Image (cartoon, helix red, strand yellow):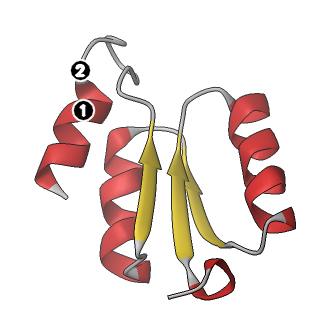
Amino acid sequence: MTASSTRVVLADDDVLLREGLAGLLERSGFEIVGQAGNPSELIALVREEGPELVIVDIRMPPTHTTEGLEAASSI
């Protein structure tokens, strides 16, 4: 599988960081198929889009402790 065929979902509550990472990945040939700002959005996007790669911030709302890590584990 090449980078150009890799479908990616990004999850981070910091919009600027998420958008910046999306831009870098797109310029490197990855296809960003979705972005999420919280764990429930992330899980819904993964179910809908079926990406090959998910990049997740482990500390997400509401408590900014392990919500992202728990979402990644469930994926």
Under tag 2, what secondary structure? loop
- Could you tell me residue 10's position as x and y percent? 54, 52
Between 51 and 2, the residue placed more toward the observer is 2
Under tag 1, what secondary structure? helix
Residue named by callout 1: 69
Residue found at the far front of this picture: 2
Residue 57's place in the image compared with 59, above or below, is below
- Could you tell me residue 18's position as x and y percent? 68, 40
Residue drawn at the location 34% of the way across and 41% of the way down: 39
Alpha-carbon span between mark 1 and mark 2? 5 Å
Residue drawn at the location 26% of the way across and 27% of the way down: 67
Between 25 and 10, the residue placed more toward the observer is 25
In-image side of 47 versus 52 (left or right): left
Residue named by callout 2: 66
Residue 22 image label: none
Between 75 and 6, the residue placed more toward the observer is 6
- Could you tell me residue 14's position as x and y percent? 65, 26
- Could you tell me residue 5's position as x and y percent? 60, 88
Where is the C terminus found, in terms of image quarters? bottom left
Residue drawn at the location 41% of the way across and 52% of the way down: 41
Query: What residue type is disc 1 on?
Result: Leu
Residue drawn at the location 59% of the way across and 85% of the way down: 2
Badge 2: how crowded within 10 Å, few (<14), some, or many (20+)?
Answer: some
Query: What residue type is disc 2 on?
Result: Thr
Corner quadrant of residue 45: bottom left
